[in-house]
Image: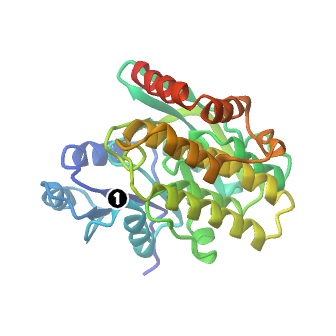
Amino acid sequence: MENSIVLSIIVPVYNAEKYIERFVNNVVSAIDVPPFEIIFIDDGSEDNTINIIRKTQKKYHGIVFYEQEHQRQAVARNLGMLHAKGRFFSFLDIDDEFDANMFTKMFSAIPQHDLVITGIWRVLSKKNKVDESVSILQNATDFTDLISRYLVDRLEMDSGLWNKLFRAELIKDNGLQFTNKNFLEDTLFVFKYLLCIQPEKIAFINEPLYSYIKHEHTTTTLFQRDMDQLASSFVEEINAQLKRIAFKDRIAAVSGIKIRTFTYVLHRHILDDEDWTIGRQKKFYQDYLQVMPSEKKLVSKKYQIGLFLIHQLPNMYIHMYRLFKRIR
């Protein structure tokens, strides 16, 4: 019997008991969704998640369920892709929300394209959400410009998984997987996918159809002791991929991604590392952020000013950044 599933929605879950039913109801009630399957991968939940999924399976067709020991979302998504039957993949987060028309608009755009990107709401709190609906990739003039923009200037809507529709065939034919443990693994996955397509094969929907809700205690907000090493492996993987395709602006692109990545890691240290000191910040700068003046010009003014303050006024920078995050 021929497979009739068009869309595989791959969803890692961990202690997600309060979100399961709402999520399924949102998918089921969405407008004009083609034949789909929801693949839940439980990542070693310790609450009632598994029982709720099994109960939901009895109520709705098309819900598939796998279990694994707690290995976080990268391994869970790989397991989901291994079993997915759809011609298109969507990677949604269980605790986010999306417009009822999101899939309708995505599937209207996908026939002539290999990737669809929709705008997002970045929900920082109940009273603070940011409309991010115009991708930095949208005006890319060629493949080189597309990749350079993604690495150096990307927005959250560009690197996130959840607001995109991917072709399963491209993922499988190119052996794409989630790697680098759970540090920027989504950014790396989207990067590798972009290496497989051309700018004209990307469709953009300039509406915030997906609400990306920022939570505390997630892998994007938690401090990891091995962050410095994971950041290094992330930059090394980017460099290796660009070398593989003989990317002509490789050095500039790697410099840009290095500055952005290690600035992000520095911020996690400032906020969450109890042992962080001015001395450690100076050493961090020397090890990871001390770059040539020509390299600093490759990133935005915001990063250039940040690098100056991190190096020249480390104590002030630490206090300013902590204050900024508290106010925000």
**Quadrant where the image shows the C terminus:** top left
Is 37 on the left-hand or right-hand side of 288?
Answer: left
Residue 216, percent across and down? 33, 38
Q: Name the residue rendered at 43%, 75% in the picture.
A: 82
Q: Nearer the viewer, residue 245 or 276?
A: 276
Compared to residue 202, the image places residue 120 above or below, namely: above
Q: Name the residue rendered at 41%, 36% in the picture.
A: 271
Compared to residue 127, the image places residue 118 above or below, namely: below
Q: Residues within 10 Å of mark 1 (few under 14, many from 20)?
A: many
Residue 110, percent across and down? 63, 53
Q: Does residue 136 appear in the picture of this structure?
A: yes
Is 51 on the left-hand or right-hand side of 78?
Answer: left
Asked which secondary structure carries label 1, the reply is strand
Q: Nearer the viewer, residue 20 or 153?
A: 153
Residue picked out by circle 1: 12
Q: How many marks?
A: 1
**Quadrant where the image shows the N terminus:** bottom left
Q: Does residue 37 appear in the picture of this structure?
A: no
Q: Name the residue rendered at 57%, 50% in the picture.
A: 107
Q: Nearer the viewer, residue 255 or 154?
A: 255
Mark 1: which amino acid? Answer: Pro
Compared to residue 217, the image places residue 90 above or below, namely: below
Is 298 on the left-hand or right-hand side of 312?
Answer: right
Residue 71, percent across and down? 32, 66
Residue 187, percent across and down? 57, 54
Q: Name the residue rendered at 58%, 76% in the picture.
A: 175
